Image: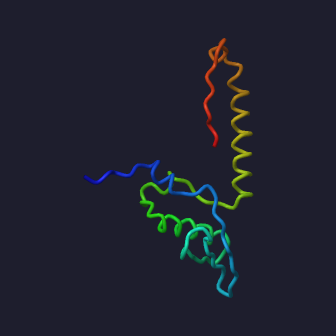
């Protein structure tokens, strides 16, 4: 009996961080993913290169197309940090708006991790 692989299985395949070795050519850029042997790709611009790197990683790790959006995407570290900061600011803003509602004021509260 073949065991079905679930979303968490594929998320676990994806490292938290990867290192790119990027090279410039007359046609654009090419990159090697250092942690994944023989994982190379190219793009005409940096933006296209990042898209192609993600595609190469998904193919390398055999991530099915139908779940690729759900397992995450690799972006430069600086961009990820900025996105997380913006998300956190938005969450705090929403909490401020909701805090005035009486039904949220209780003697006890359960906190859940929402942002990873």
In this view, the residue farthest toward the bottom is 26
Q: Residue at 68% of width from left, 24% of height from top?
A: 98
Spot occupied by residue 20 in the image (x, y as percentages of width and height): 66, 70
- Residue positioned 48% across, 64% down in the render: 61
Image quarter (top left, top right, bottom left or bottom right) of the C terminus: top right
Q: Examine the rendered structure and indicate whether residue 78 appears above or below residue 51.
A: above
The answer to which quarter of the image holds residue 62 is bottom left
* Image x and y of residue 28, in percent: 66, 81
Side (left or right) of 106 relative to 82: left
Residue visible at 57% across and 76% down? 41
> How many numbered discs sit on the rendered protein?
0
Q: Is residue 3 above or below residue 92?
A: below
Figure check: 23 above or below 2: below
Relative to residue 32, is residue 71 drawn left or right? left
Residue 80 on image: x %, y %:
69, 54
Q: How did the renderer colour the structure? A: rainbow
Left or right of residue 5, residue 75 in this image:
right
Q: Hey, which residue is sitting farthest top in the picture? A: 107
At x 70%, y 50%, the residue is 83
Q: Which residue of the protein is positioned furthest toward the left in this rendering?
A: 1
């Amino acid at each position: 009996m073949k065991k079905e692989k679930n979303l968490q299985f594929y998320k676990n395949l994806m490292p938290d961080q990867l290192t790119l070795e990027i090279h410039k050519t007359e046609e654009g850029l090419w990159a090697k993913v250092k942690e994944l042997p023989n994982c190379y790709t190219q793009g005409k611009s940096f933006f296209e290169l990042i898209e192609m790197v993600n595609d190469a990683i998904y193919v390398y790790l055999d991530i099915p197309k139908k779940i690729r959006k759900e397992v995450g995407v690799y972006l430069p570290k600086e961009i990820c940090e900025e996105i997380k900061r913006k998300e956190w600011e938005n969450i705090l803003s929403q909490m401020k708006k909701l805090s005035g509602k009486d039904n949220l004021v209780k003697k006890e509260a359960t906190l859940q991790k929402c942002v990873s």
